[in-house]
Image (cartoon, helix red, strand yellow):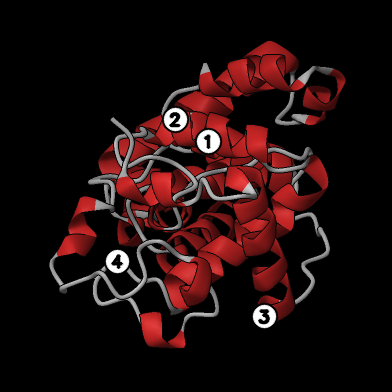
């Protein structure tokens, strides 16, 4: 059964019109977000693996620590897994992540002779995602992050902020899984709007539509949000996944 939030978006303009309004308002409020590459695909891949279940600040520090200690990801690939674990401890789950990072880098070298993932650009999106998610510890969100943030492929990653805000806005139903959310949101958002909308939803989720005690009185979407001013302070956990999608 669909949520009441989704039902309220089915007015004269329907869900498509509701989404268009959201994109326009967020764009006007947060400004343009021209695409910029965040680095080599393998760099984005490893940093995104590090970001699972931790903050961007901690994952970035852990990634920099790897490069400072081993010189490059090629150096990380040759390092002992216990040394990798020690280096990335501040990112959390270091034992699991160190093994996954080592396995990913070793597999790339074994299969391709290098850590270059540019070959993904020669695949269709489905095949590229399939390859990436075949790597240890890489789920749909991580795969999409590599494609959009490194290679500029117009996909739509769904992290905890995008997931929460999209549910509250009635873009997806409350029982939609993270993987379903990515497929549904990507299908409804035009390719040219996906990158900036992803960033706008994250920023909005961090600054205004927080998991606990969202600031509805400061929200530029309050007039069109079916969930505005409906929170009692305890509801938020129902919208937040227990773990970040990989």
Count the numbered circles shown. 4
* Quarter of the rendering occupied by the N terminus: top left
Give me the residue at 60% from left, 16% from top: 130
Residue underneath mark 4? 211
Closer to viewer: mark 1 or mark 3? 3
Q: Which quadrant of the figure has residue 3?
A: top left
Label 2: which secondary element? helix
Marks 2 and 1: CB-CB under 8 Å? yes
Give the mark nearest the N terminus, 1 or 3: 3
Residue underneath mark 1? 182
* Quarter of the rendering occupied by the C terminus: top left
Give the mark nearest the N terminus, 4 or 3: 3
Label 1: which secondary element? helix
Cα distance between the residues tagged 4 and 2: 20 Å
Q: Residue 114: percent from the left, percent from the top?
A: 74, 26
Looking at the rendered structure, which numbered label has been put on residue 71? none
Residue underneath mark 3? 29
Looking at the rendered structure, which numbered label has been put on residue 179? 2
Left or right, residue 151 beside residue 78 = right
Label 4: which secondary element? loop
Left or right, residue 113 beside residue 70 = right
Q: Residues within 10 Å of mark 1 (few under 14, many from 20)?
A: many
């Amino acid at each position: 059964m669909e949520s009441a939030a989704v039902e309220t978006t089915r007015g004269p303009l329907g869900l498509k019109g509701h989404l268009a309004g959201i994109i326009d308002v967020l764009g006007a409020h947060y400004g343009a977000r021209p695409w910029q590459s965040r680095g080599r695909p393998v760099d984005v891949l490893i940093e995104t693996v590090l970001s699972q279940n931790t903050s961007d600040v901690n994952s970035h520090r852990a990634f920099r620590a790897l490069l400072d200690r081993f010189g490059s990801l090629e150096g990380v690939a040759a390092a002992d897994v216990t040394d990798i674990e020690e280096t990335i401890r501040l990112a959390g789950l270091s034992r699991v992540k160190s093994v996954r990072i080592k396995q990913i880098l070793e597999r790339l070298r074994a299969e391709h002779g290098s850590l270059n993932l540019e070959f993904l650009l020669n695949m269709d999106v489905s095949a590229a995602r399939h390859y990436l998610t075949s790597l240890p510890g890489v789920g749909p969100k991580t795969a999409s992050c590599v494609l959009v943030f490194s290679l500029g492929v117009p996909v739509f990653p769904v992290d905890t902020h995008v997931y929460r805000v999209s549910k509250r806005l009635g873009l997806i139903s409350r029982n939609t899984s993270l993987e379903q959310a990515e497929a549904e949101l990507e299908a409804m958002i035009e390719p040219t709007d996906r990158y900036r909308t992803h960033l706008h939803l994250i920023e909005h989720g961090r600054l205004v539509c927080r998991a606990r005690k969202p600031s509805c009185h400061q929200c530029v979407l309050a007039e069109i949000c079916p969930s505005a001013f409906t929170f009692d302070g305890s509801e938020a956990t129902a919208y937040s996944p227990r773990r970040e999608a990989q």
